Image (cartoon, rainbow, N blue to C red):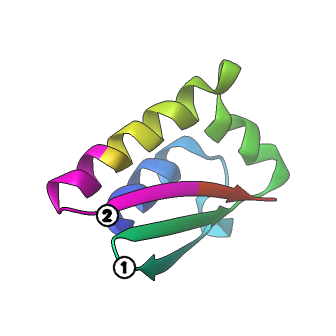
Amino acid sequence: MKEFLEFIIRQLVEFPDDMVLTEIPGGKMTIFKVQLRQSDVGRIIGRNGQTIHAIRAMLNSSASRHGQRATLEIVE
């Protein structure tokens, strides 16, 4: 799942080398925290949050196939 998220986010941001994706496992729930440049945060959130909602939906779908739950947080 981490590689999946990394691939998607790197395609959307202007400075992919400055992205830091951290995985915090915890039982059946995994939390992913992504740190980006301030200018890239808007690209990930999207208009009215549509992009981040789509990324989270794909992440939840992928996690549920493995019998887990996952969430994505943006750290500024």
Disc 2 designates what residue? 1
Quadrant containing the C terminus is bottom right
Q: Is residue 42 above or below residue 35?
A: above
Residue behind mark 1: 27
* Residue positioned 42% across, 48% down in the render: 8
Q: Position of residue 12 (x, y in %)?
A: 54, 42
The image quarter in which residue 4 lies: bottom left
Q: Residues within 10 Å of mark 2 (few under 14, many from 20)?
A: some
User: Tag 2, which secondary structure?
Assistant: loop
Q: Residue 42, relative to residue 39: is it above or below?
A: above
> For this view, does 1 lie left or right of residue 73?
left
How many marks the image carries: the answer is: 2
* Residue 8 is a magenta residue: no
Q: For the residues carrying marks 2 and 1, which lies nearer the camera in this image?
A: 1
From the viewer's perspective, tell me whether residue 46 is left or right of residue 8. Answer: right
Whole-angstrom CA distance, mark 2 to mark 1, is 15 Å
7 to the left or right of 68: right
Q: Position of residue 50 (x, y in %)?
A: 57, 24
Residue at the (45%, 32%) spot, across then down: 54
Amino acid on which disc 1 is placed:
Gly
Whether the magenta-drawn stretch holds residue 64 is answered as: yes
Q: Is residue 36 left or right of residue 69?
A: right
The magenta stretch spans which residues? 61-72
